[in-house]
Amino acid sequence: MSENAKLTILQINDTHGYLDLHLEWMAGPRQPAYRAAVGFARIATLAREIREETHGHVLFCDSGDTFHGTQPVVQSRGEMVVPILNELGLNAMTAHWDFAYGPSHLKSLASKLSYPMLAINIYDQDTNVRFFPPYSIQEVGGLNIGIIGIASNIVDKTMPPSFSGGLRFTDGREELTGFIAEVRARGADLVVVLSHLGFPQDMKLLSEVAGVNVLLSGHTHHRLFSPVRQGETLVIQSGCHGAFVGRLDLEVQEGHVVGYRHQLIEVAESIQPDPTVEALVKRALTPYAEPLARVVGEVSTALNRNTNLEATMDNFLLQAVREAAGTPLAFCNGWRWGAPVGPGPVTKNDLYNILPMPVPISTVELSGQELIAMLEENLERTYSADPSQQLGGYIKRCLGLTAYIKIENPSGTRLQNLFVGDAEVRTDHMYRAAYLTMQAVPEKYGRNRRDLPIDAHDAMMAYLEKHNPASAEIRGTVVVI
């Protein structure tokens, strides 16, 4: 290895199937702004230009959540993304929602990629054999890079059982130290961890495990405008939906990073699209374009899923679900993915951005005591002081209740007051609720579950037909005190 070798690391994470033009939420001085973000053809251009600039000294990694998230990608079970990804010149990836079609299908998708899917923390339950290779050592610009993958650890804990059938997932902490030593022993000059644990979880992991030069974080959709240091490790994460590419330029000497520069690059519409990838994206999306462009209603408020306590997008979804089910309460998971919908006409594609797969509306009866326990569990999974216990997305989305919480309190004591409608909750009273998936109301809560003969998309269509335009304001459902 030569002295002061140079390496540029590029990162994408949590693209969630957004191959082409969509809106993206951007922070503003008084209210958020919405700008077009334009996906993989422009990402390909950025990657090509940076390779030319650096004489090919580029390591390009994907931290996962790639094969799921938009209706065309879900319909193709991730298959349409493979040729597009293979044109980007990626070096490695790991996984989370990519398990949505089951483990065997993800393994099939991974076998078609021109780069490895890596995970030190996924095992066959029966044989204890790792499901994917744990690492890859690749030579880039005269440096041997040990890339170690850590997939999301919540797939077998909070996701539908079909995602993880036959597999078990760990947080990778016990495995990581040994693999750092192994890749170093095999000649790695630099250790890069490709993670989908989440930014808080990654920071805790690095406080316990030394020897990582760079960690490429995913899962929590953080836009890190500068690297965060944990000990000697540089950590970056690069937004979501293909709206950003993270660039980290390193100067390396004797296995240590002695200088760095970082840029979070917005994938702006002004970037010239790569013609090859643009053609692949167009070919993949054209069969879906006409039906998805059909206007099905109008909204007067922007719908987004970018705020933690409550979001307009999920308020709209739950307003439709609650009206269809005729229940006083409605719940859905606090999903992070989903491109915003601006005020004005709403298309079928917009509804699929809210929920890319058909989900039946279900009902359940919950006691007041169960409501309290379920919400406390969710608050702990969102705000736990121990990052390894943060197992969710945002706060569970709720409609029909008002919760007053203290985020800083210990587990089980955050919920201060809870109202259903205009009345304070009674622990011995039963409440009817509609919900979407077991992530919203886990199986251990409630009784008399029933699936209705209507799914969430039908409900949203009916709601838009009845309410024109529809609105979905922030209601103050969850109030921090």
Image (cartoon, grey):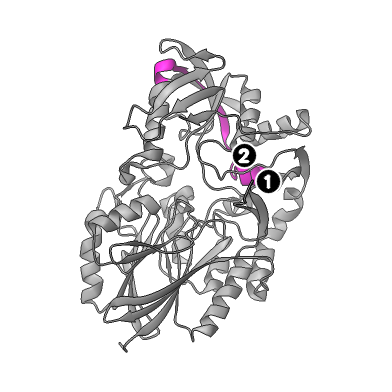
The residue that appears at 40% across and 68% down in the rendered structure is 116
User: Label 1: which residue?
Assistant: 341
The answer to whether residue 152 is seen in the rendering is no
Quadrant showing the N terminus: bottom left
The residue most toward the front is: 29
The residue that appears at 33% across and 64% down in the rendered structure is 133
The residue that appears at 34% across and 85% down in the rendered structure is 4
Q: Secondary structure at mark 1?
A: loop
Disc 1 to disc 2, C-alpha distance: 8 Å
Tell me if 44 is positioned left or right of 111 in this view.
right
Nearest to the observer: residue 261 or residue 38:
261
Residue 407 colored magenta?
no
Residue 356 colored magenta?
yes
- Contact between marks 1 and 2 (CB within 8 A): the answer is yes
Residue 118, position in %: x, y?
37, 63
Quadrant showing the C terminus: top left
The amino acid pointed to by label 1 is Val
Q: Which residues are magenta?
A: 351-370
Tell me if 421 is positioned left or right of 103 in this view.
right
The amino acid pointed to by label 2 is Met
The answer to whether residue 285 is seen in the rendering is yes
Residue 367, position in %: x, y?
43, 16
